[in-house]
Amino acid sequence: MSFPCRMSAAASCALGLFAMLHAPAASAATERVQRVSATAVCEAPLPVFDTTLRKRPIGITNQGGPSVFVSCSLPADSAAPPGGASVSARFAMIGEAPPVTVQCQLVAGTADAPTYTAGSIVVPAAGSAWLTWNGVDKGTASATLNFSCHLPSGVDLSTIMYREVDAAGGL
């Protein structure tokens, strides 16, 4: 890459080049929010249950008759302190089925020290709803966030959003 500079203006050209290449100091983030497709992070617990699940680029739908468990594992940031996370999952009713209740269990922490938090949401007919767990404490910074849901027939799990905070700006 060449920069058109006159020899007599070398100093100002160098200063301009330095200013152009030098990024201003930015403070570290205190919050990180990530959205992922359920297709990327969710699976049925056994292959036999996969037969009624339709995986699309934007979500997973239970197209069978019986409800199916779907488990999702989120990549948590080890720089984030253990407390203050939130996890949200969007469920939508596909078609004209009556409203149903989706029941889930959030598991946070490590294999040695897991914590469990139940949650449920009513998904309206031809509508959608978000299930959110707030104030999730992972126990340690290196812990993970996971949840499993009992996905009724005709329900789609699409977007998962999770938020981690660090007041010290370490994210």
Image (cartoon, grey):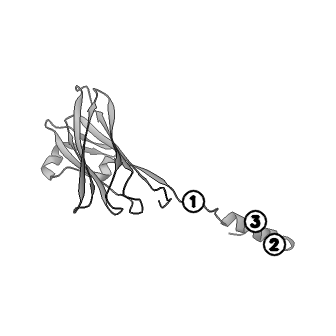
- Judged by depth in the image, the label closer to the viewer, 2 or 1, is 1
Q: Position of residue 6 (x, y in %)?
A: 83, 70
Q: Earlier in the sequence, mark 3 or mark 2?
A: 2
Task: Kindly state the secondary structure of the residue where label 3 is placed.
Answer: helix
Going by the numbered disc 2, the residue's amino acid type is Ala
Neighbour class for label 1 at 10 Å: few (<14), some, many (≥20)? few
Going by the numbered disc 1, the residue's amino acid type is Ser
Q: Earlier in the sequence, mark 2 or mark 1?
A: 2
Name the residue tied to disc 2: 11
Q: Position of residue 113 (x, y in %)?
A: 24, 60
Going by the numbered disc 3, the residue's amino acid type is Gly
Q: Residue at x 31, y 60 (%)?
A: 143
Name the residue tied to disc 3: 16
Q: Earlier in the sequence, mark 3 or mark 1?
A: 3
Name the residue tied to disc 1: 27
Q: Position of residue 164 (x, y in %)?
A: 41, 53
The image quarter in which residue 91 lies: top left
